[in-house]
């Protein structure tokens, strides 16, 4: 069955530069070169660049940087031991670079409200990247036949009668977050912070996603269900 985006539009290429003037006492730390490349090109492209660099015999290859918070890293390290070996990584439903755009266009008060609303840890953007309802355990991107790149990557359920696919409840909430962020990415004045009305609408959806996640998992911890993956000819796709 062909992959269907289920109301999640493809994104337009765009810059995600933060507001020019940050109203804080100290400037934000500059991201590492590898992190910037991941944000611009995605993990798969960076992996290809790394491979080319190694083939050319570079003495100082760029190292991949972990995006996980320290708490998620520990959880993943423990849970991964009990999973099938081909389930090697975590995928974001709402892509990481969209979350970065969102975070970089929040003011200090909004960031504090976001942390409180969804129980984020102290690691800033890494804590948002590690928001467990937004993660799916699965195979590496290069082993997928349905990798959506930097578009929405939801999970699906099948209607019992029509057998048509639709977003799961949790993914149905998160696709609304994705759509709102794509709209902001394409229309928002990059020199300004996100308006409070738009911010509150997105936070409310994230809270809904977290509530649904807790119903499924029983806690805010990582969901390690991998039953949605089907293997064919050595590659995997979501069913």
Image (cartoon, rainbow, N blue to C red):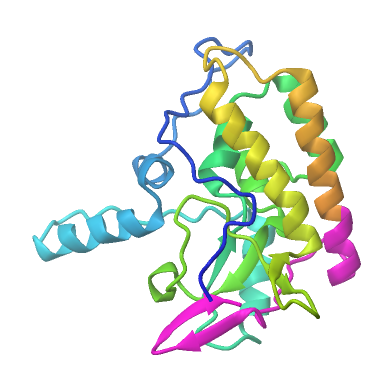
Q: Residue furthest front?
A: 162
> How many numbered discs sit on the rendered protein?
0
Q: Is residue 12 left or right of residue 117?
A: left
> Residue 34: within the magenta?
no
| Residue 160 coordinates in the image, percent (x, y) | 80, 80
Residue located 74% across and 70% down the image:
223
Residue 52 appears anywhere in the view: yes
> Residue 230: within the magenta?
yes
Q: Is residue 49 left or right of residue 165?
A: left
In this view of the protein, which residue sits in the foreground, 147 or 24? 147
| Residue 100 coordinates in the image, percent (x, y) | 56, 37
Residue 28 appears anywhere in the view: no
Q: In which quadrant is the C terminus drawn? A: bottom right
Residue located 68% across and 49% down the image:
175
- Quadrant housing residue 206: top right
Q: Residue furthest left?
A: 56
Residue located 57% across and 20% down the image:
188
In this view of the protein, which residue sits in the foreground, 7 or 117? 7
**Residue 183, relative to residue 129: is it above or below?**
above
- Quadrant housing residue 227: bottom right
Q: What's the magenta region?
A: 211-239
Residue located 64% across and 56% down the image:
6
Q: Is residue 217 left or right of residue 233?
A: right
| Residue 122 coordinates in the image, percent (x, y) | 71, 41
In this view of the protein, which residue sits in the foreground, 116 or 204? 204
- Quadrant housing residue 80: bottom right
**Residue 76, relative to residue 38: is it above or below?**
below
| Residue 205 coordinates in the image, percent (x, y) | 81, 43
């Amino acid at each position: 069955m062909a992959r269907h985006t289920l109301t999640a539009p493809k994104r337009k290429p765009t810059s995600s530069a933060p507001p020019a003037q940050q109203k804080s006492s100290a400037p934000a730390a500059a991201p590492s070169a590898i992190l910037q490349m991941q944000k611009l090109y995605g993990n798969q492209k960076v992996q290809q660049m790394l491979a080319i660099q190694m083939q050319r015999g570079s003495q100082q290859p760029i190292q991949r940087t972990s995006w996980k918070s320290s708490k998620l890293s520990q959880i993943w390290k423990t849970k991964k031991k009990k999973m099938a070996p081909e389930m090697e990584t975590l995928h974001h439903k709402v892509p990481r670079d969209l979350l970065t755009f969102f975070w970089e266009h929040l003011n200090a008060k909004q960031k504090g409200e976001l942390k409180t609303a969804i129980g984020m840890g102290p690691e800033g953007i890494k804590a948002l990247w590690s928001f467990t309802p937004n993660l799916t355990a699965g195979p590496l991107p290069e082993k997928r036949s349905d990798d959506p790149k930097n578009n929405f990557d939801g999970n699906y359920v099948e209607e019992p009668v029509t057998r048509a696919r639709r977003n799961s409840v949790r993914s149905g909430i998160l696709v609304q977050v994705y759509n709102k962020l794509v709209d902001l990415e394409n229309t928002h004045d990059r020199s300004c912070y996100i308006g409070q009305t738009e911010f509150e609408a997105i936070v409310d959806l994230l809270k809904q996603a977290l509530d649904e996640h807790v119903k499924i998992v029983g806690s805010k911890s990582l969901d390690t269900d991998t039953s949605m993956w089907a293997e064919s000819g050595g590659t995997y796709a979501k069913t």
